[in-house]
């Protein structure tokens, strides 16, 4: 550290990833301010430029391996910003491809085993114990990776050895993955109305102690609109997908359309995936992946949640609605976000 005038300047090593992004550590007063609101953040965050992507520090140790991941032509990637309906969509895609008649015993495995969250390892602490309940949720990891150390990337290692046809989930934007991705695999990208994303992400961030957000929705929305939430900024994430919307291997779907016309959207998805399902099979998929059924099947997620938040607001599967934000936003907050959407999403997208 040196003094320039009366200002302390800290020189930090800037690492360049294979994606071409520079890594800058978020520390000092900025990180201290973030930790006052996000009590679960025990390590620093990092920013990746260009894009100003905000991710956990552990990402820099996984970034190049994620970038060089060996995708197969039979893979389907479900890509979204957090809380845009990822879990619902991944279950739809997996069921359509692997269990349309609901008779595949693999359908009884956990969501983590069926559809690995390939970049989710950055959200898991390095010191996670081998007997952690989180790791115990996955029978597939121990079965398919018997000699592997989960600290080397639990989901990443599982993704590598999962048999075809693989469905893999990511919250990473296109620019952090290899540019050949869309020419190799099919990608289902889900977009959701920003106000609904903010409300759902706020609940999620309060629900889990590893995030531990302490604060009102208004303050969280400020983080959201400034691109200062993990995996943000949202508008850049969506813009990168929107610019690729004509690519034959990209299927862009709005969360609100899935809620309004599930059978119509399943038919569109069936055409894209080439699964050739009958209306009877699609109806089974729709029922199997309904909010109530998924909530009943996935109670394990709530075992890691804060009980007081579950009691007051609900668990991992909270409402399953597309317009709950209307019950949370004040007129002032709605006006603020309307102005922000008009400014940032000026590239042609129209939210439903």
Image (cartoon, grey):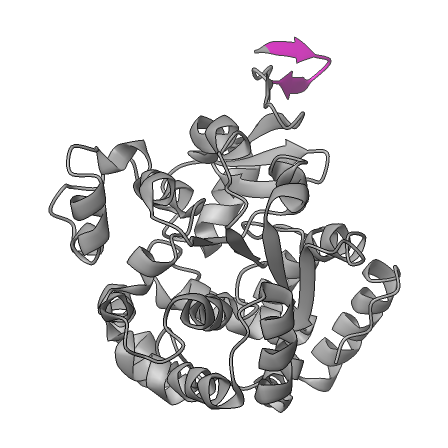
User: Depth check: 229 or 293 in front?
Assistant: 293
Is any atom of residue 159 visible in this view?
yes
The quadrant holding residue 343 is: bottom right
Which residue is at a point 59% across and 27% down the rendered structure image? 23
Q: Which residue sits furthest top?
A: 2
Q: Position of residue 117 (x, y in %)?
A: 41, 52
Left or right of residue 175, residue 76 in this image: left
The quadrant holding residue 104 is: bottom left
Q: Where 270 falls versus 12 (above or below)? A: below
Quadrant assignment for the C terminus = bottom right
Q: Position of residue 44 (x, y in %)?
A: 45, 36
User: Depth check: 220 or 207 in front?
Assistant: 207
Verify whether residue 116 appears in magenta.
no
Q: Where does the magenta region start and end?
A: 2-9
Is any atom of residue 328 visible in this view?
no
Q: Position of residue 84 (x, y in %)?
A: 57, 68
User: Depth check: 231 or 279 in front?
Assistant: 279
Q: Where 23 falls versus 33 (above or below)? A: above
Quadrant assignment for the N terminus = top right
Left or right of residue 275, residue 124 in this image: left
Left or right of residue 160, residue 133 in this image: left
Which residue is at a point 49% across and 68% down the rendered structure image? 93
Which residue is at a point 20% across and 50% down the rendered structure image? 135
In this rendering, the count of numbered labels is: 0
The quadrant holding residue 333 is: bottom right
Q: Where 84 falls versus 285 (above or below)? A: above
Q: Which residue sits furthest left?
A: 131
Q: Position of residue 217 (x, y in %)?
A: 56, 72
The rendered magenta stretch, by its main secondary structure, is classed as strand
Which residue is at a point 33% across and 60% down the rendered structure image? 114
User: Depth check: 333 or 185 in front?
Assistant: 185
Left or right of residue 70, residue 268 in this image: right
């Amino acid at each position: 550290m040196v003094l320039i005038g009366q200002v302390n300047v800290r020189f930090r090593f800037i690492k360049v990833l294979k994606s071409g992004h520079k890594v800058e550590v978020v520390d000092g007063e900025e990180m201290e301010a973030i930790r006052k609101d996000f009590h679960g953040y025990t390590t620093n965050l990092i920013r990746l430029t260009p894009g100003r992507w905000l991710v956990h520090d552990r990402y820099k140790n996984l970034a190049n391996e994620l970038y060089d991941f060996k995708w197969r032509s039979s893979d389907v990637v479900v890509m979204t910003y957090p809380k845009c309906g990822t879990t619902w969509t991944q279950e739809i895609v997996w069921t359509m491809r692997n269990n349309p008649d609901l008779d595949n015993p693999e359908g009884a495995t956990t969501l983590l085993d069926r559809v690995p969250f390939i970049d989710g390892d950055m959200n898991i602490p390095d010191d996670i114990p081998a007997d952690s309940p989180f790791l115990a949720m996955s029978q597939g990891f121990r079965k398919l990776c018997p000699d592997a150390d989960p600290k080397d990337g639990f989901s990443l290692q599982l993704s590598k050895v999962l048999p075809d046809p693989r469905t893999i989930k990511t919250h990473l934007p296109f620019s952090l993955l290899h540019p050949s991705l869309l020419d190799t695999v099919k990608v289902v990208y889900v977009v959701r109305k920003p106000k609904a994303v903010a409300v759902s992400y706020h609940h999620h961030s309060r629900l889990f102690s590893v995030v531990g957000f302490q604060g009102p929705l208004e303050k969280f929305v400020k983080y959201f609109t400034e691109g200062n939430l993990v995996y943000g900024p949202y508008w850049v994430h969506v813009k990168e997908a929107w610019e690729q919307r004509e690519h034959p291997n990209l299927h862009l779907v709005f969360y609100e359309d899935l809620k309004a016309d599930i059978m119509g959207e399943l038919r569109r998805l069936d055409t894209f995936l080439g699964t050739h399902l009958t209306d009877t099979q699609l109806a089974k998929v729709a029922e199997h992946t309904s909010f109530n059924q998924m909530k009943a099947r996935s109670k394990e997620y709530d075992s890691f949640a804060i009980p007081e938040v579950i009691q007051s607001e609900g668990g991992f599967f909270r409402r399953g609605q597309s317009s709950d934000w209307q019950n949370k936003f004040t007129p002032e907050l709605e006006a603020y976000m309307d102005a922000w959407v008009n400014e940032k999403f000026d590239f042609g997208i129209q939210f439903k």
